[in-house]
Image (cartoon, grey):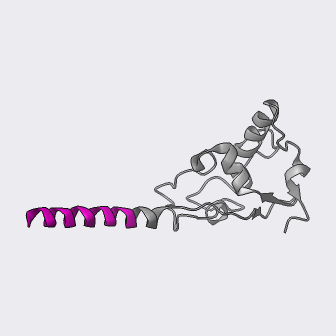
């Protein structure tokens, strides 16, 4: 009888662990994401293609900060990064992606690296920013 109780307890722990893990699991969007608000035009981001190159979510997405914790596992950049930046956040929306002249930053640095390694990545403003992306 003790074996049955131990087995039942173990099965319960495993089930609870799997349920908790699936509740916190994040799924990547399958359709393109439209990043709006840029004066040059919105950016249509193929999330699946970017994840394939980056390999890990953390390459593009940073962890939440204690002063501004996440409200949901898949929170939009614009929920925290606004124009202008709203305290306690100090980085406005555009700066979350690249500097004002687009010579450095999260997106453009990666695009330049990929391009230099022979992989076609857009490096000109108009390649990503399009008025037609709505």
Q: Which residues are magenta?
A: 1-19
Query: Observer-nearest residue: 119 or 14?
Result: 14
The residue located at (74%, 38%) in the rendering is: 109
Q: Position of residue 55 (x, y in %)?
A: 62, 44
Question: Which quadrant holds residue 22?
Answer: bottom left
Left or right side of 97 for 69:
left
Q: Position of residue 58 (x, y in %)?
A: 57, 47
User: Split into 4 quadrants, where in the image is the N terminus?
Assistant: bottom left
Q: Is residue 123 visible?
A: yes
Left or right side of 5 for 76:
right
User: Split into 4 quadrants, where in the image is the C terminus?
Assistant: bottom right
Given the current orientation, which residue lies at the most extreme left position? 1
Q: Would residue 120 be counted in the magenta stretch?
A: no
Query: Observer-nearest residue: 52 or 58?
Result: 52
Given the current orientation, which residue lies at the most extreme top position? 117
Left or right side of 28 for 19:
left
The secondary structure that dominates the magenta segment is helix
Q: Position of residue 115 (x, y in %)?
A: 82, 35
The answer to whether 41 is drawn above or below residue 91 in the figure is below
The residue located at (73%, 51%) in the rendering is: 49
The answer to whether 134 is drawn above or below residue 43 in the figure is below
Q: Position of residue 124 (x, y in %)?
A: 89, 44
């Amino acid at each position: 009888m003790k074996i049955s109780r131990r087995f039942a307890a173990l099965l319960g722990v495993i089930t609870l662990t799997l349920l908790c893990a699936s509740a916190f699991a994040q799924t990547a969007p399958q359709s393109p994401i439209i990043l709006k608000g840029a004066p040059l035009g919105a950016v249509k981001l193929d999330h699946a293609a970017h994840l394939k190159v980056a390999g890990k979510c953390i390459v593009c997405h940073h962890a939440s900060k204690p002063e501004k914790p996440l409200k949901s596992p898949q929170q939009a950049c614009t929920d925290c990064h606004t124009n202008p930046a709203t305290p306690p956040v100090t980085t406005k929306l555009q700066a979350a992606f690249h500097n004002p002249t687009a010579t450095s930053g999260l997106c453009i640095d990666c695009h330049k690296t990929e391009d230099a390694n022979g992989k076609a990545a857009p490096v000109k403003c108009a390649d990503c920013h399009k008025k037609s992306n709505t």
